[in-house]
Amino acid sequence: MELREFFSEDSIKLDLAGKAKDDVLKELIGLFNLPEKSEGILFKMLKRRENLGSTGIGRGIAIPHCRSLVVNRLRVAFGRKAPPIDFKAIDDKPVSYFFLIVAPPLEVSNQYLPVLGKIAQLCRESDVPERLRAIETPAQFLELLSEKQV
Amino acid sequence: MHPQLEILLELQDLKAQMLEMEKRDAEYSSREIEEDVFRISAEEAIVQLDTKIQEMEAGLDPDVAARYRLVSGRRPRGSVVPVVDGICYGCFVAMPTAMTRSNETLRWCEGCGSFVYFVD
């Protein structure tokens, strides 16, 4: 199982417009094309998770995540925001790169935690923030994932 | 969406999050990831989630709360289950074809008793 398998070009947005944490979360949720009501419930769940502690892991990266019944399979998305925004990250630095992960509570394939772990592993690599900054197309993002073989 | 179903969905998601945080023995443990990667205290998070769950349970109508209590203790898959392609994911039995597939009405599965949520 590699991360590349879970992303598609339409779940990648390299020019997020939101200027604050909530706007960016909503924009990322929008990449899943869920019904409006489901988007609202998912937003609430992500906010509840953020209330436990920011998912901003430092070096300009955040990994908002939760389980929710509003999705019927694991969903992932990536977004990039320039200039970076305040996300209350653990290093107190603003965030530009967002990996969103959502899975249903009952997940037959149990992919959620391994995928969350792999994204965290990817983000620990020293060159990743710079590589994420340099990509110009969703296809290049997918190529980066393939190259990293995470 | 039916307002009580919205509360039930949130409750189910919060419970899933809390149960996952409590597990210690999984190969990929949510608790480990939350503590190591996100630097949150799992114990504090569990207390916060439990408090929120109790607050939300208090917002259920009495008849809904009664069914919720009845099914939540005995259904390992939870008191609210998705229905995907007409199949209840609580008991994997097909829902009656005459049943309107809408979340505007609060419904439950005649097979397992769990509240159902129709996933698009």
Image (spheres, coloured by chain):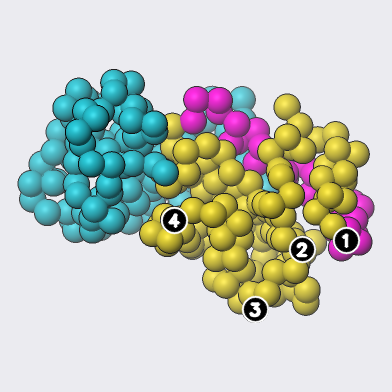
Separation of disc 2 and disc 3 at Cα? 14 Å
The reply to whether dot 3 and dot 4 touch (C-beta < 8 Å) is no
Q: Nearer the viewer, mark 3 or mark 4?
A: 4
* Amino acid type at mark 2: Leu
Closer to us: B87 or A75: B87
Residue position marked by numbered label 4 in the rendering: A35
Within 10 Å of disc 2 (Cα), the crowding (few <14, some 14-19, many 20+) is some
Residue position marked by numbered label 2 in the rendering: A14
Report in which chain the residue with disc 2 lies: A
Separation of disc 4 and disc 1 at Cα? 29 Å
Q: Earlier in the sequence, mark 2 or mark 3?
A: 2
Q: Earlier in the sequence, mark 3 or mark 4?
A: 3
Chain letter, yellow in picture = A
* Amino acid type at mark 4: Pro
Separation of disc 1 and disc 2 at Cα? 8 Å
Which of the 4 image quarters holds residue A146?
A: top right
Residue position marked by numbered label 1 in the rendering: A136
Q: Earlier in the sequence, mark 4 or mark 2?
A: 2
Separation of disc 3 and disc 4 at Cα? 24 Å
Q: Nearer the viewer, mark 2 or mark 3?
A: 2
Element type where label 3 sits in the image: loop
* Amino acid type at mark 3: Lys
Give the color of chain B as drawn: cyan
Report in which chain the residue with disc 3 lies: A
Query: Residue A118: x and y, percent?
Result: 73, 38
Element type where label 1 sits in the image: loop
Residue position marked by numbered label 3 in the rendering: A19
> Is B76 placed left or right of A69 in the picture?
left
* Amino acid type at mark 1: Glu
Q: Earlier in the sequence, mark 4 or mark 1?
A: 4
